[in-house]
Image (cartoon, rainbow, N blue to C red):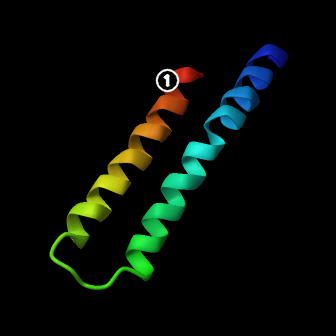
């Protein structure tokens, strides 16, 4: 069980910068971006990047 916890924390630490960047991007687009024609597409793209980062972390474990 100790090996799994070590691997889990290592993968979380490795994925943390990507996760933080995606969350910050989604938050900035949702809160501060003006209503523009491409805003929905930008939010969808950032959300897709967040989802793939989460899936990459899950698959890494």
> Vertically, is 35 above or below 21?
below
Of 59 and 34, nearer the camera is: 34
For the point 55% across and 54% down, the residue is: 21
How many numbered marks appear? 1
Task: Please give the name of the residue rendered at 39% of the width and 75% of the height, measured from the top-left corner.
Answer: 30
Residue 2 relative to residue 22: left or right: right
Question: Based on the displayed image, in which of its 4 quarters is residue 5 positioned?
Answer: top right
Tell me if residue 30 comes above or below residue 50 in the rendering. Answer: below
What element does badge 1 sit on?
helix
Give the residue at the far left of this rendering.
Answer: 37
Tell me residue 1's x, y (percent): 80, 17
53, above or below 36, in the image? above
Which residue in the protein does label 1 denote? 59
Residue neighbourhood size for the residue with mark 1, other residues' Cα within 10 Å, grouped as few (<14), some (14–19), many (≥20): few
Q: Position of residue 25 (x, y in %)?
A: 46, 62
Residue farthest toward the right in the current orientation of the protein: 2
Q: Is residue 58 placed above or below 43 in the rendered structure?
A: above
- Locate the C terminus and report the quarter of the image it occupies: top right
Left or right of 39 in this view: 47: right
- The picture places residue 18, in percent across and down from the top left corner, at 56, 44
Tell me if 20 is positioned left or right of 26 in this view. Answer: right
Q: Residue at x 43, y 82 (%)?
A: 32
- Is 26 left or right of 4, judged from the image as shown? left
Q: Which residue appears at 56% of the width and 48% of the height? A: 19
Residue 27: x and y in percent read 48, 70
């Amino acid at each position: 069980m100790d090996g799994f916890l070590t691997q889990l924390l290592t993968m979380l630490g490795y994925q943390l910068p990507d996760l933080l960047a995606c969350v910050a991007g989604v938050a900035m687009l949702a809160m501060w971006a003006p209503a523009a024609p491409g805003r929905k597409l930008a939010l969808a793209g950032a959300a897709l990047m967040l989802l793939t980062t989460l899936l990459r972390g899950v698959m890494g474990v």
